[in-house]
Amino acid sequence: MNPQLLSALRELLGEAGLLLNGDWSRYQQDWRGRYQGRALAIARPASTAQVAGVVQLCARYGVSLVPQGGNTGLVGGGVPSSDGSQLLLSLERLNQVRELDIPNLTLTVEAGCTLQSAQLAAEAQGLLFPLSLASEGSCTIGGNLATNAGGTQVLRYGNARAMCLGLEVVTAAGDVWSGLSGLRKDNTGYDLRDLFIGSEGTLGVITAATLALVPQPRSQMTALVTCKSLDAALALLSLARGRAGPALTAFEVMNAFSLQLVRQHLPQLRQDLPSSPWTVLLELSSSDDPAHTRTQFESLLNLALEDGSIQDALIAESLAQSRNFWQLRESISMAQSKEGLNIKHDIAVPVSRIPEFVAATDARLAAHLPGLRMVNFGHMGDGNLHYNVQSPPDMAPAEFLAHFESPINQLVYDAVGEFGGSISAEHGIGQLKRDELAQRKDPVALGLMRTIKAALDPQNLLNPGRFL
C-alpha cells in the first residue's frame, strides 16, 4: 500500500484531493469497458503546484502514475494497471479558464477544462475554438492535447496540435515548464510543445494550454448527400475542394450499415434520405453572407448531381436540422456499442487511395470470415477512417473478439501498410496498439522515441506500459 507515500499525499492534497476508498469505476474503467484497472489511490490535485508535488512524491517513493483527463480515450491510455501499484493522477479539478486574450485570439485554460467549456468561453466573445469531438462535453483539453485529438474539422483547422500555441507541463522530475506563450512565431530552440503534444502522458503531465482561436464564421451550412460508391464520394470531395476552397469545413462519410445501426438502436434520430451505400455529411463555413454561401452550396450540389457524384442531397434548413445531421454521424459509435463488442481500427491512408483500400480490405476480410459486418465511417476529407468490424449476426461478440481479433487486426494493419497509411490516426496508441506500434513503426523512429523517453523520464514513472 505504500503508507508513507499515501500519508505524504494526504498532507499535500487534503481530504478532497486524495481518494482512498469508494466507487472508483469511472476512473478505473475505460469508456469502451475494455480495460479495467485497480489504482493505489486517486490523486486529484487542484493546482499545478500540487501536480508537481504529487510527481515529486512518486519519484521519491518509486511509484508510477497514470495521468487522466476525462477518461474518454479509446485505447486504454488513461487506465491504471490491474495490480494496484499505480497512482491515478486525475486532472479534473484543474478546470479553470485562466485568460482570454481577444486581440491576440488566444484562450488559456487548465488541463481539466472540458473541450465544451473551452468552446463556450470562446463563443461568448464571438470567437471559435474549432476542435470538435463527439465527446466534447466530457473530454478535457489536457487529454485532447496528450493524444493530439483530431475530430470533425481537421480538414479546415488541423489536429489539436495545430490549435495549441503553448503549454504548461510538469516534468517527470516534478519541475514546471511554463511555456504558455501566445506567440505564433518563436524560433528559439527545440519545439518542446510539440514534444509533449501526442505523447500520451509518457513524457510529462500537461497542466494548462494556450489555444489559438479564430473568428466565428458568419455563415455555416450543412448537407447530407448519398453516393453509390466511395469513388463517387472522392469525386465529390475533389469538386467541393475546387468550388468551396477553405470554406469546406467537414467531409464525413458513413456506410449503409453504420446508419442502419443508428436506425436500429436510436430510432428517435430522423434519417430523411433513403439508404444508400454511402452517405456524406458536408459542411461549409464562411465569413461570407449566408445567402452567398447558400448559393455556393446549391451550385456545388447541382454540379455533383449532374456529373453523377451524388444521388440525392438535402441541405439543412435550420440549426436544429443541422444538429440532427451531425447527431446521426456522432451517434454511430454509440449504436455500434449497443450492437455488441467490435474490433475498432482508427486508421489513416492517403485520401486518393481510400476507395481502393476499402475495396481490397473488405474483400480480404470477407474471405477470412464470411458474414462480417463493416461499420465504416469517418473523416474522409483528411484520410481518417474508423474502419470497424462487427461480428457475423449469428456469432456472439465476445466469441468473435476472442477468436478473430488478432488475425483481423493483422489483416487490416497489413493492408494499411501496403497503402502507405498509419495504424492510428487520432485515437493514439495507449495499451491497445502498443505491441502493433513496436512491430510496425520504423526501427529508427522507435529508437529515437525510446531515447527521448529515457532522457525525460529515466525512472519510467509516467504512464509506463503505454505507448512504448
Image: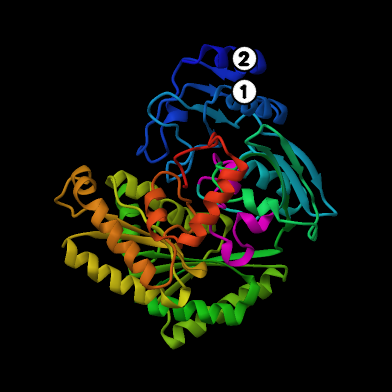
Give the number of the disc on residue 8: 2
> Label 2 sits on what residue type?
Ala
Q: Is residue 22 left or right of residue 171?
A: left
Q: Which residues are magenta?
A: 135-164
Q: Residue furthest bottom?
A: 307
Q: Residues within 10 Å of mark 1 (few under 14, many from 20)?
A: many
Q: Report the residue marked by disc 1.
A: 57
Where 236 falls versus 76 (above or below)? below
Residue contact between numbered discs 2 and 1, judged by CB atoms under 8 Å: yes
Amino acid type of the residue tagged 1 in the rendering: Leu
Q: Residue at x 17, y 61 (%)?
A: 369
Out of 18 and 465, give the one closest to the viewer. 465
Front position in the image: 75 or 31: 75
How far is disc 2 from disc 1 in space, using C-alphas? 8 Å
Instruction: Please tell me which residue is depicted at 73% across the width and 54% down the height of the picture.
Output: 212
The answer to whether residue 227 of the structure is visible from this angle is no
* Residue 139 part of the magenta-drawn span: yes
Nearest to N terminus: mark 2 or mark 1: 2
Q: Is residue 364 left or right of residue 33?
A: left
Q: Which mark is residue 359?
A: none
Residue 444 percent across, percent down from the top left? 50, 61
Horizontal side of 178 relative to 276 (left or right) equals right
